Image (spheres, grey):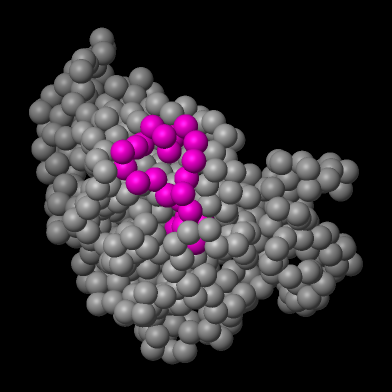
Amino acid sequence: MRYFGIKLTHDAAVACIEDGALRFSVELEKVRNAPRYTPATRLADVLGVLVEEGVTLTPDDVVCIDGWDGGKLKYPSPHDVAPYHEWDTTARGRRIGNLEFVLARGEVADALRPAQVISTTHVAGHILGAYAMSPFSATRTPANVLVMDGGVAPRVWRVDPAANSVRHLGSIANLYGTLYGIMGYYAGPYLRRDINDLDPVVDGPLLGGRDVPGKLMAWIAHGKPNFELMGACYSALAKLPPVEDAYAQDFGLREHQFMRHIMRHAAVEGASGADILATIHAFVGIMLVDGAADFTPAGEPLIFTGGSALNIKWNSDLRRARNGSPFFIPPCPNDSGSAIGAACAARAAVGGAYNLTWSVYSGPQLPVPRVCPPGWLPLPCSPELLGGLLATRPFVVLHGRAEIGPRALGHRSILSAPTEGMKDELNRLKGREAWRPVAPIALWTPPVANMFHAHAPDPHMLYDHRVNRAALDVIPAIVHLDGTARLQTVTAEDCPVTAAILQSYAAATGRPPILCNTSANFHGTGFFPDVESALLWGKLDVWADGTLYTKEKNDDHQFQI
């Protein structure tokens, strides 16, 4: 039996599980250079993915649509689905503990028949997708799942496959994950002077914006926590009402109340904008660590998921606090993984299976180029040869299936040497702020582990690492303002092409097998879906599946290979 998951709202995607393995997960933003977080605005968006993947639905297939606010969707057409939260409705169908499944109705559901089309809560997708992707699912080991998402305050569930049970254990705090974007409107580079004149209940932009949190996570390195202001965070939190039954009524309001309380105290303390944001960031991190410990004793597995699990600082805080106890974060913890989560939830509800075999490289396949545009010269080039060329300049690097989730992990990347000035050059090429960091991609070896104080591989770029002082002059381009780096490690087993590139770069230069890695995309869009898009962007030469595309009139003769 096959299980399909579909996310129709922002971060729209279609995923397929077949014979217990993730066959594909295609986010629409990665299909046609669509804007990041793009929704499915047409029925063809969904059906096109199935056609491209060669899928014909049968009566034995189960399709699960991700649930949303109030159980209603506006596009591609009015749709009846499951709600966002488990408390939004009473039971109308299958249940696993607190989690509900209902019959989906609407244009998309009708078009997907003869498959059985159901829907589950958005929260269920986060919980069961994260558990299925964890190593605990293979042994059916019970685990606690901490979820903090844009519309989910930090809450903990217990997943027990043997008992076919998912139950809510409790809430850690009463702030939604939207806080991280909203706080950026009160201080820092995205400050809005009109903030106090707008009603956060009805003004959509005041929910914080989906691209602000990731940028703020980097910008807080400009500040330091203010301990007097930390006390104001605790008092502000205590004043907020509980979150249950409030999603549709005051989404965003409590976070603005929290911030206005903090800003009044910040004015008294004279704290800078950077220190205000650093303080709130540290406060939430402490809240998550303490709350997770309350629900999950030492030695028991803990999973962290939801959009807030893209915050590498909180992730690292949680992992350190677990002190070696089992801990896991999926590579797509935000809504980019919701289609996978919906498919996993359906499989648990209908098939009783909670585990999943998967690869992070399960996104769209890189198509064979149809034509080489005028002005470009295609040349054969092995990964080993590319590694040597990377000592001289950056390249767009495309190969195989794209990554799932929001982070480029070597298959849809711009790679370069991590030398002095390269961070500024990459930020200039991508039109990003100069303070934005660039991540390292490194071959997992003992010397690399020592450079980043890493105790285990980190293949999905989910944690920050303190860079060894002795390495600062060797890899300056990947070191952030606070002396940390968002490391991704690679082995020949999990990514043989990237491993070969790193090995040959090290052999050609005598430097460590470490490169700069940032996503290959137009500004504000998903990853390049094909070679033609990268050539249209045209700011760098492009390597794709063994072919180097270089400008025909390139004056740099080192590219005559």
How many marks the image carries: the answer is 0
Give 447 or 89, whichever is nearer the viewer: 89
On the rendered structure, is 497 left or right of 243?
A: left
Residue 290's x, y, as percent? 58, 82
**Quarter residue 389 falls in:** top left
Using the rendered image of the protein, determine whether residue 29 is visible from the camera's viewpoint: no
Residue 181 seen by the camera:
yes
Q: Nearer the viewer, residue 404 or 168?
A: 168
Q: Position of residue 284 (x, y in %)?
A: 63, 70
Residue 5 against residue 53 in the figure, above or below: below
445 and 249: which is toward the camera: 249
Residues shaded magenta: 100-126
Give the residue displayed 14% in from the left and 41% down from the top. Answer: 383
Side of 263 relative to 437 (left or right): right
Instruction: Please give the name of the residue rendered at 71% of the width and 41% of the height, measured from the top-left corner.
Output: 204
| Magenta run includes residue 113 | yes
Q: Which residue is outermost to the bottom?
A: 298
In this view of the protein, which residue sits in the foreground, 52 or 402? 52
Please determine whether, in this image, residue 30 is positioned above or below residue 176.
above
Magenta-colored stretch includes residue 401: no
Q: Relative to 131, does residue 149 appear above or below in the rendering? A: above
Image coordinates for residue 546, horizontal then vertical, percent: 13, 34
